[in-house]
Image: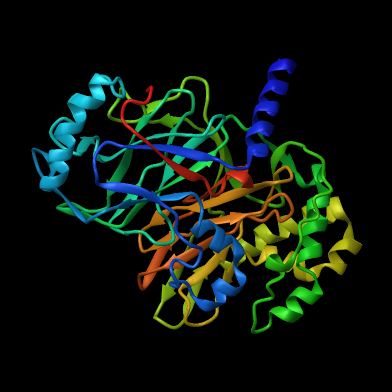
Amino acid sequence: MVAAAVAEEDAVAAVVAAADPVIEVLEAFELASLVRRNGTLDGGVPLRAAQACLPFLEGNGLGLQVRLSRALTIERSLGRAPRIIDERASIGLKAAIPRLCALGYVTEPWPSAFARSLVHEHKGVLHLFTGLLVRPPDGTWLRIASSANRRSFAYDVGEVFIPDGIGFVPLVIPIRPRAGGALRIDAEIATVSCVIPDVEVQRATLGDAPELARAHAEFFDAVYFAKKKGEPTKKYRKTAPYLDREDGPTRVVEAGPVKFTIERKDQVLSAASPTPIRSRGHGVTAIDFVTLLPFEAAWDGLSLVLEYEQTRLQREAAALERLWKQVMGAPFLDANKGALWYLTKYFTPHPPGEPHFFVKPWAFVQTPPGWSSVVDGVLGDGFEVMRGVVQTDWFHAAPAVFRVFEERIRVREGTRLLEVLPFPRALANPKVRAVAFGDSP
């Protein structure tokens, strides 16, 4: 067991040390490509966010985007298989399938499922073949998820993975339409990023990690709140990571009443199955946070007003304060009232004119030096929780940033908020290498 653990750590260290990940891509026919987008979304983000919010910018630029070369319409009707009317794609698909089979890139039942159409439907999910086959860098898995922060609200993308060591795998995007009828898809439809499988994430209490409470108080000190009045502090962007911690476990630390689970994500794409299958014995570890209490938000175009049971929040906040007093002592609480208040208020609206607000789960995420965490949110009814990349080796909060696009939203207690997925920062911006047909599958 010890030898296996050491071997695994050595393999991860080798991947991180390489710091130049390359995703190999084979294009079976022309329909989509993997492209990089910049953090400002081509100048589309608010100036204040572009100046100050580094996690948001890094979330925008994470990995590579699956971009269609042209818009497609998926026609759906009761009792009939979905189809895409696109002559160029149909011709390319019909020519590619026999070739992929002959060269051993795909095996049944995959080719039969996609023989007539780019789309295969299973249990209400549309599985779209992009015309690309991909192979992750050695020692990593590819994560396919929504394009986030700039995506269509007409559908959601299911999270799936592509393991290493199995050759080229068809890049198939699971699409869940949010309404019936025809579905138009265009531009960026998904994000492909690199992650490390089988990372152990431990659960801990604040008593196990009082240094994280001190780090929180050091960041959110009196100077921070004095500067924040009216203007962004840019403290996160300006702070140099103080990475004096030796390599240790990745862990999520309960800093108060909080609801989360540590999950193993094991739905993988394969060259044999048209739909995702479960990986045997391996997976990608993530922390899934859910809401602590129900709430609503009203947005009128200028102001965003949050509505929730204040007595309930006060009760939960009192429990957090009791925990901190027990672990850190009363003098610490008296000296760091602002830092504690920043946590206990739970909600933080943005300035007027912005349809955004924060929800802050009462937990800290800690990763080894050189590791960050993807903080990836859900697409809900009238809102999305946006993607960010947080340097959790020194800054340990995992906020859920809501973007509201309807006049009123309702979020029930226990609603899934976000997924936090630790990964080495060296894998954040992989390169692409085109591969020709005939390479060994």
Q: Is residue 376 above or below residue 273?
A: below
Please state which of residues 249 and 287 is positioned toward the viewer in this rendering: 249
Residue 343 position, x and y percent, is 69, 63
Please state which of residues 223 and 436 is positioned toward the viewer in this rendering: 436
Relative to 263, 192 lies left or right = left
Residue 308 position, x and y percent, is 52, 67
Relative to 397, 380 lies left or right = left
Where does the C terminus fall, quadrant-wise? top left
Q: Is residue 43 above or below residue 180?
A: below
Residue 136 position, x and y percent, is 47, 34
Q: Outermost residue toward the right?
A: 331
Q: Is residue 32 above or below residue 380?
A: above
Residue 151 position, x and y percent, is 36, 59
**Residue 158 in which image quadrant:** top left
Asked whether residue 100 appears in the rendered view, the answer is: yes
Asked whether residue 293 appears in the rendered view, the answer is: no
Residue at screen point 45% across, 44% down: 432
**Residue 12 in which image quadrant:** top right
Please state which of residues 45 and 134 is positioned toward the viewer in this rendering: 134
Q: Is residue 271 above or below residue 156?
A: above
Residue at screen point 68% across, 83% down: 229
Where does the N terminus fall, quadrant-wise? top right
Residue at screen point 87% across, 68% down: 335
Total marks shown come to: 0
**Residue 41 in which image quadrant:** bottom left
Residue at screen point 55% across, 72% down: 49
Please state which of residues 37 and 337 is positioned toward the viewer in this rendering: 37
